[in-house]
Image (tube, helix red, strand yellow):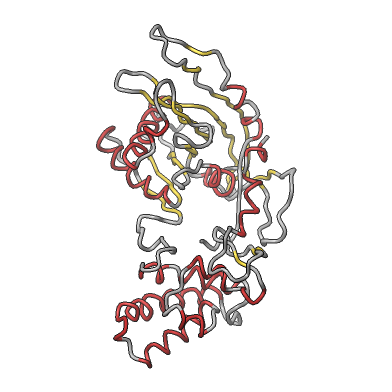
Amino acid sequence: MAYVANFKTVVISTLFAFCTSAVNADEVSDSNNKKSIPEATKFVTQHKGTFNGTKLKYEAVAGETYILSKNEEPTAAIFSFDYLAADDNKNRPVTFIWNGGPGSSSNWLHMGAYGPKRVVVPSDATAPRLAPYELKDAPETILDVTDMVFVDPVGTGYSRALGDTDSKAFWGLNQDASAIADFIAQWLTKENRWNAPVFLLGESYGTTRAAAVSKVLMDKHLINVNGIIFVSQALDYQGSSPYVDDNIISYITYIPTLAATAWYHKKVDTSGDFEAFIDASRQFAVDKLLPALFKGNALSKADRKQIVDGLHRYTGLSKQYIEQVDLRINAFRFAKELLRDEGVAVGFLDGRYKLDERDDLTAAPKQDASKVIGPAYSDRASI
């Protein structure tokens, strides 16, 4: 569960309109009667916009890059959406971007965060809009400082295994990292950008992928990345697993998120400054709650009362509930408990959204209230 302040989105609509038909392009067969391999697709359009005050002309490229075996045979087609500024400087930075899952395409970061256009969804968590969905410029994108390549790993988006290769051959930490590293090396070669500063940007599990890819790039291709951007990092699985009851660390790392969600729904004192409130919740979690949980039953009654008071102050949950869960607030259960008196649950992806579930007595929500934004990010929003 994450507290999402806003959604930005992107897609160049003319690119997507051809993607389905492109897969049916003339196929190439070999003499060994192996499965035919279609020609790689590529569609290019020209655009212009103003990003962070900088006027730019840029090229949008939607297309495939084939991953090759040791025998130089295509084993997979990785689809990417590239945004390249019209700049003669071949050393302009390029950032490779992907989501997590690990079964997610780059759709969310592409259409909701970093691309030059975005799909419009309510930023105040009001009733979701219905189709048709509106595309609008996203002037906050980072295209003014770096080219962007949104990457769909094999089995997501339009990326797929080719020939006799099974998609499962790419579904492992090492296999995934190797395929993405191969893609980056081939992309840099194809675009003549080997001297460009290279950055990796991943979200959630994509942060794990980014860390792994950076090592493969160096070990296998002698490409040293200039930097890695972690969005909603999942490198620390203890700290990012709120559904494991005996995971003490997650009870610490999620406190600021719970506090922000409680603030939004006015279940805590909102008379002060929001940022100061969140900073105070973080300090409480690290300095007070963490040592208290590690003390276990050695925690004194006086210290326990202070912890209960603090958790109540920052999460908005009742002191009785906090005692019942033994100071350990499961983030998924929090989504159900925060507004239980109203008969609604809050979202996992976006804690501002609410859903009136039929069963008000379950410990945790059965579904994510924020899933209502999903249709806006589906392929039909880009056609």
Q: Is residue 244 left or right of residue 52?
A: left
**Residue 261, quarter of picture:** bottom right
Q: Is residue 42 left or right of residue 205?
A: right
Of 323 and 379, the residue lying toward us: 323
| Number of numbered labels in the structure image | 0
**Residue 136, quarter of picture:** top right
For image coordinates 71% across by 55% down, the residue present is 128
For image coordinates 65% across by 68% down, the residue present is 344
Residue 84 appearing in the image: no
Q: Position of residue 298 (x, y in %)?
A: 29, 86
What residue occupies the far bottom of the structure in this picture?
302
Quarter of the image where the C terminus is located: top right
For image coordinates 43% across by 46% down, the residue present is 201
Q: Is residue 219 left or right of residue 117?
A: left
For image coordinates 35% across by 40% down, the residue present is 172
Q: Position of residue 9 (x, y in %)?
A: 61, 47
Height in image: 350 above or below 291?
above
Height in image: 197 above or below 165?
below
Residue 273 appearing in the image: yes
Of 53 and 339, the residue lying toward us: 339
Height in image: 223 above or below 200?
above
Q: Position of residue 317 (x, y in %)?
A: 54, 79
What residue occupies the far left of the structure in this picture?
219
Q: Position of residue 8 (x, y in %)?
A: 60, 50
